[in-house]
Image (cartoon, coloured by chain):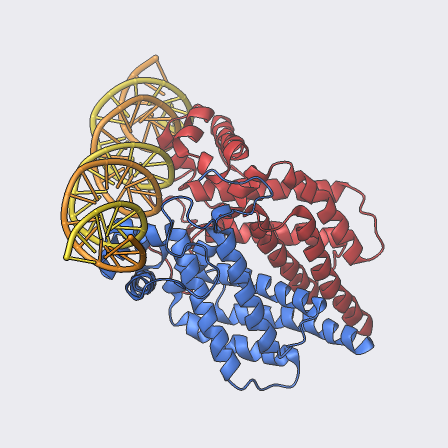
Chain colours: A blue, B red, C orange, D yellow
Amino acid sequence: MTEQSTTETAGEESASTQTSRPALGSTRSPGAGLRPAQRARYMRIIASAEELASEGGYDAVQMRAVADRSGVALGTVYRYFPSKNHLLVVALVLEFETAAEAVTTAEIPGGSAAERLMGVLRGVMPRLSENPLRYDALVRAAMFADASSAAELDHLGEVLTRLFAQAAGLDIVTEEVLNAVRIIADVWMSSLVSWVAGRQSVGDVLAHMDTAVTLVFDRLTELQRAS
Amino acid sequence: MTEQSTTETAGEESASTQTSRPALGSTRSPGAGLRPAQRARYMRIIASAEELASEGGYDAVQMRAVADRSGVALGTVYRYFPSKNHLLVVALVLEFETAAEAVTTAEIPGGSAAERLMGVLRGVMPRLSENPLRYDALVRAAMFADASSAAELDHLGEVLTRLFAQAAGLDIVTEEVLNAVRIIADVWMSSLVSWVAGRQSVGDVLAHMDTAVTLVFDRLTELQRAS
DNA sequence: GGAGAAAATGTAACGCGTTCTACATCCGGA
DNA sequence: TCCGGATGTAGAACGCGTTACATTTTCTCC
């Protein structure tokens, strides 16, 4: 994988050019279009990876261990996921999707968009800090991903954007709102990197996010009021 | 290195507990306190790493190749840098320090803090895009770094903060300005990650930064005017 | 200028991500 | 029901980060 070329779409999706992988970079719901037994294997592999991550962080997610724990052969893991990093990025996407669903169903209190956003973040962070090693693995994998994971990373971005947008209660997704939300997502990912590296506490992260959310959304709502 | 513990200072700096490494996590100027020959080796190793990075990105920076190219033994590379990642993070810090110096000496035009900040970014990005593979290596290493690189990453944060603060021309570093600058730095690092992964063009990055800078600093200057 | 410590060298070895290969098994269609 | 390709298995093998070690070179200090 000596990729990189400044502009590349990491194209895949060709029907079955080679030996036709099951799901690969499908940015849709995980394991869509798989036979039940395959879907089960797919999910089992992800679950094993997350377990190992929870136990020992990124280093403990060893592909042989993942294979053993999910009861499949090493080659099978690689049939479903082209690399350890792809696997972990998909896992992170699933985590955030779960979080997003929780946000949809839950009542989001708070007067302003900024307040609701912070409410959600304050609800999410404790969940993360219950399991620092797990997010050490997932977050570092996501930030380390190379161009071959572009599809998965784009999906991750979408999920995050949706999560924050509906947290803010801004269903009317104007371009401006989208930009604001993307900025928040960027700051959050950077903060998570600091957190998993042990350079910021959960409190630090929340304080930082509070500043960012306030600055970005206060200005945004003013702009909207003006228009 | 199975680190992690939510709160950890990655303590080093003990005078010479073990076999006394030369510089290690010294967050000061690189290779400070080294004999000339050692300082030369230290810089040569970094230079080799950057060359290899420029030629083939993260994967091409192979420790044996770094050793060969700098004319030292593999073990010597590891005496100066505890891991490939530490090495690359130090290299990134040096790059940003160089950029920061350029900013200090250069006249920064532009009326508002936001405009000057964007001016600097517009000046820096082309330099990065001349060498995408180099920054693929450096940026991904920085984001992948684990807790053992906390000291280097903190230093990186300081350098970035300083760079942006003086770009904005805000020498009066109030806590609020500092927060704003940190947010910009976070957004920038996230954007760089997207860029090296081939998911955003240089234009995308600049547009995104423009939005962020505008939102954050417009609001900030208002707040300052009010006080 | 010589002794002892520190630094550097060269090389072998280990661990884990990834690839490859030969074989077994499953599944959908004629 | 049986065939053929896709899927899964087991295990060897390769590359590179990292460590260990025996040996030589270079400093430091007296």
Which residue is the extreme one toward the right?
A: B111
| Rendered residue at 33%/51% (across/down) | A79
Estimate the x, y position of residue A44 in percent, counting from the top left: 30, 64
| In the image: residue A82, left or right of residue B138 | left
Q: Quadrant of residue B220?
A: bottom right
What residue is shown at x 72% (from left), y 60% (from top)?
B211
Q: Quadrant of residue B75?
A: top left
Q: Is residue A178 above or below residue C14?
A: below
Closer to us: B27 or B180? B180
Q: Is residue B148 above or below residue B24?
A: below
Residue B149 lies left or right of residue B158; in this view the side is left
Please, is residue A158 above or below residue A123 in the view? above
| Residue drawn 73% across the image and 65% down it | B215
The foreground one among A25 and B49 is A25
The answer to whether residue A207 of the structure is visible from this angle is no
Q: How many marks?
A: 0
Q: Would residue B144 appear left or right of B193 to someone viewing this image?
A: left
Q: Quadrant of the C terminus of chain B?
A: bottom right
Task: State whether residue A36 appears in this view.
Answer: yes
The percent coordinates of residue B121 (x first, y second) are 71, 48
Residue B106 x, y percent position in the rendering: 77, 41
Towards the viewer: B209 or A156: A156
